Image: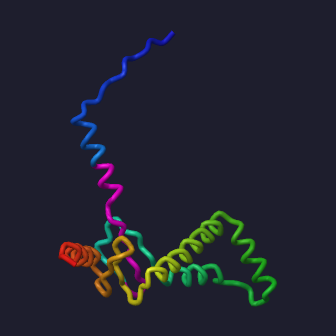
Amino acid sequence: MPTRQPLTRIPLKVVLPLAFLSITTFIQAQTWVITDQSHPITSLGPARIILLDQQQHLESELSRALPSDPHQAAASIQSRLNTPSGKRLQTDLAKAQQDLTDAWSIGITKIPAVVVDRRYVVYGEPDVAKALALINNAKGQPQ
């Protein structure tokens, strides 16, 4: 019969910093970078990338080399969509559509755009680190 090991107590001075780190990671600002493939960006870091033209590119990929007959083309697409890569493409298309909806819902008017917490935005700055610095400076000022 196995012997029971006594529970090891972890010192509070170890637990508290870990708990604080977890909390600060959780409340860290949410950053979205909204652009398209014609407007490259730099210094990404941990950000959600929204490519406004991604759906168009995925649809082009799906319709590449289709037969000219509409019935054959429909059958070909159905066949492709039932493969593992087709299922991945469907998932990517759904994500691209959600990305478009999210960008539209916060009123993005120009690209590139760097958005923090769906509230603060910098337009036209392709360097995400610089855009984030501008946002942080603006947030630090009294309103």
> Where is residue 39, by image quadrant?
bottom left
Q: Quadrant of the C terminus?
A: bottom left
Nearer to me, 61 or 124? 124
> Where is residue 13, by image quadrant?
top left
> Is 133 within the magenta?
no
User: Residue 110 location, x and y as percent?
Assistant: 39, 89
- Left or right: residue 37 compared with residue 19: right
Nearer to me, 107 or 4? 107
The residue positioned 60% from the left and 71% from the top of the image is 89
> Is 37 within the magenta?
yes
Q: Residue furthest top?
A: 1
The residue positioned 65% from the left and 63% from the top of the image is 84
For the image, the number of numbered tags is 0
Q: Residue furthest right?
A: 71
Q: Residue furthest front?
A: 143
Q: Which residues are magenta?
A: 21-39
- Left or right: residue 104 compared with residue 69: left
The residue positioned 69% from the left and 70% from the top of the image is 81
Relative height, residue 83 to residue 10 (above, below): below
User: Residue 85 location, x and y as percent?
Assistant: 62, 67
User: Residue 74 location, x and y as percent?
Assistant: 76, 81
User: Residue 6 location, x and y as percent?
Assistant: 37, 17
Nearer to me, 78 or 103? 103
Q: What sort of colour scheme is used for the picture?
A: rainbow
- Left or right: residue 97 compared with residue 46: right
